[in-house]
Image (cartoon, rainbow, N blue to C red):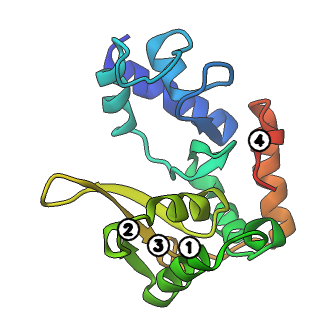
Amino acid sequence: MDTETAAGSVREALEQHGLLLLHDARLPSVTTIVAGAPVRGSWWGHPAGKRIYDVLGRVEAAWPKLLGGKVTLVHRRLWAALAAVGEQDAPWQLDGLDDDTRAVLDRVRTAGELRSDELGRGAGPKVTALERRLLLVAEEVHTDDGHHARVLRTWARWLPEVARPPASEARWALEQAAGSLGARSRLPW
């Protein structure tokens, strides 16, 4: 399957379900669609790895760590629901966060946006914990010196001026989408 055909198939699955895992060997995922079969282990080393990477660049989606803490593509129609859930500060998001991780969250909320490499060494696990609890939005970038960093944003900065549905409606919309993949139990709440 060529790259454009594969990208069309991924867009179609994302349109149908609203959510699509980037990589999973059992549930519907970008890697399975592009490779034509489940990919075990890292997809980077798979023969279809370059095509998977190219397809990802052609699909418009949000990429939170939503289902089972894994990168999940989210269709644009669910972005307001995703932001509404992320902005809740619900107990499942905040309970158990250590002081250092809360301090990272406070810094992002104060700034609206900052890069993970501005947080000092050891910030990676804290940022990942915040991502998995949907407390911020993170986008991977390449720095000028060739390293990887994440741009961290509040939901308000990521999706400004878009009305949010009530939290219960937002969760229901995401639960329905996850259910269509057979992944409702993988939601973080």
Query: Left of 2 or right of it: where is 9?
Result: right
Q: Which residue is mark 4?
A: 186
In front: label 3 or label 2: 2
Q: Secondary structure at mark 4?
A: helix
Residue at 48% of width from left, 71% of height from top?
158
The CA distance from mark 4 to mark 3 is: 24 Å
Instruction: Name the N-terminal-most of marks 4 and 1.
Output: 1
Q: Secondary structure at mark 1?
A: helix
Q: Secondary structure at mark 3?
A: strand
Q: Residues within 10 Å of mark 3 (few under 14, many from 20)?
A: many
Instruction: Name the N-terminal-most of marks 4 and 3.
Output: 3
Q: Is residue 88 above or below residue 10?
A: below
Find residue 127 and report its horizontal and vertical position in percent: 51, 64
The CA distance from mark 2 to mark 4 is: 26 Å
In front: label 4 or label 1: 4
The CA distance from mark 2 to mark 1 is: 16 Å
Cβ–Cβ under 8 Å for marks 1 and 3? yes
Q: Which image quadrant is residue 68 in?
A: top right
Q: Residues within 10 Å of mark 1 (few under 14, many from 20)?
A: many
Q: Which residue is mark 2?
A: 116
Q: Which mark is residue 155?
A: 1
Instruction: Name the N-terminal-most of marks 3 and 2.
Output: 2
Cβ–Cβ under 8 Å for marks 4 and 3? no
Q: Which residue is mark 3?
A: 153
